[in-house]
Amino acid sequence: MSEAATPTQPQSTEAELIAVRREKLAKLRELGIDPYGARFETTTTPAALRADFAEGVQVKVAGRLSAIRTMGKSVFFQVADIHGSIQGYLGLKELSETDLAAWKCLDRGDWIGIEGETFVTRTGEPTVKVASFTVLSKALRPMPDKWHGVADRETIYRKRHLDLMSNEDSAAIFLKRSMMIAEIRRFLQDRGFLEVETPMLQDIPGGAAARPFETFHNALGMPLTLRIAPELFLKRLLVGGFTKVFELNRNFRNEGISRRHNPEFTMLEAYWAFSDFEEMANLVEELTCSLAEKFCGGLKIEHKDEEGNVIKTIDLSRPWKRESYHTLIAGAAGDDFFTITPQQRRERCDELGVQISPDMADHEVVQQVFEKLVEEKTFNPCFVTHVSSELVPLAKLSPGGKTVEVYELIINGQEISPGYSELNDPDIQRERLEHQSGEETQKVDYDFIETLEHGMPPAGGIGIGIDRLIMMLTGAASIRDVVLFPLLKRKE
């Protein structure tokens, strides 16, 4: 019998369960059975067998014992992996003495391989009638309770393996994430983009305004940082002759943690020579809708609460709204917002309930209004275009020189993707970066500016926060629900 208990039975302590499992481990060894198995040739997987099921077929399949139900001399059980499960049937009367003793040493959570013939039960369940089984791994710790799974959020994030083996919805999100990333690669490669890799260790962090993680290279005797963005290296490739290039990369920012921020995150950056921010917006719109239609069943994305009630529906139907930064802010803060004085703008913030600090520059005050009154209240897709030039030092100026040719894609109250017409004038780029760094000119990447002096073609560029995109497409409430191993504070 399995150690699993029904909700009405008393539960043993974990220590007691582990002790019982160790006894079974020893018994397997006494029987001459390696409890940690070896190579097992499979003909299919549990999910593939179920999806393309036919009766009377000899199969070999392996997985974790996720459920065991003993009925007299008959045992029905589930063999599962991350993709799905298949039922197995075992007649205990038909087992040899050794195999029967070995079976009695198995529990939920153990890995086995089974060989047998497929059939359908009287209740219509696809099943494998087991002729032989092989012990592949004896689990010493029990699986989560089969009735409730893992419900505690901290346990879910700290022990993702328990979450994946017991929560089907969580496993489905990570399977979907993996398939979406593969589709993003295919989508770009089909359009002529080449995937590249650029350094994670950088002498001068660039491509974004963020605090980096700092480290030190002993052999070179020099400080280094983990990259905050790959942008400057990807633009070097444009100078070198690449015309369509992308990188799916890991970025690191030594900043706050929230339901939308993890210090280590996945970003897509892509650059397209001879393009601009509007064409890049078209690309992102097409890519996102393609992912939604392929993996989410359509362009209406439902977000639900923990009880399964729909709390909002995001509509990705095309074409997506495009509106200028200043127009959107004026609509939220007053038509006169950009004609009143900076001091009056600060006073308006008080009236609107937007918190600002005394040391904020005027463009930072405006950005705070945007984030609180526009961004956080925008759920359906909106490309916010022509942002103030102070905010984006790496983008090309719009005609007139007060804004830059930029979009910020907002969906579900957060930025999903920025896109630029890339600045390729080395003199203007030098001025912008030096202004941004203030007195700390050692933070300016002059090697990058020198690279631009060799000539970078006009180009459009995009970044897509993959974690946030997947949050939006799957309805996840927190970035931790779409990152397999989010960073957590060490437990004392």
Image (tube, rainbow, N blue to C red):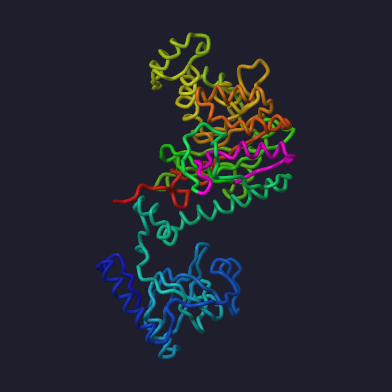
Determine whether 234 is above or below 178 in the image: above
Please tell me which residue is depicted at 47% across the width and 44% down the height of the picture.
Answer: 216
Q: Give x and y (percent) for residue 487.
A: 42, 47
The quarter holding residue 322 reads top right
Determine whether 320 is above or below 290 in the image: above
Please tell me which residue is depicted at 31% across the width and 79% down the height of the picture.
Answer: 23
Please tell me which residue is depicted at 68% across the width and 18% down the height of the picture.
Answer: 399
Q: Give x and y (percent) for residue 227.
A: 53, 41
Magenta stretch, residue numbers: 219-248
Name of the residue lying farthest toward the bottom: 97
Determine whether 402 is above or below 144 in the image: above
Q: Give x and y (percent) for residue 130.
A: 50, 81
For the residue pair 282 and 157, the one nearer the viewer reads as: 157
Q: Is residue 233 left or right of residue 302?
A: right
**Count of number-bearing discs:** 0
Please tell me which residue is depicted at 52% across the width and 20% down the height of the picture.
Answer: 329
Asked if residue 240 lies in the magenta stretch, the reply is: yes
For the residue pair 399 and 301, the one nearer the viewer reads as: 399
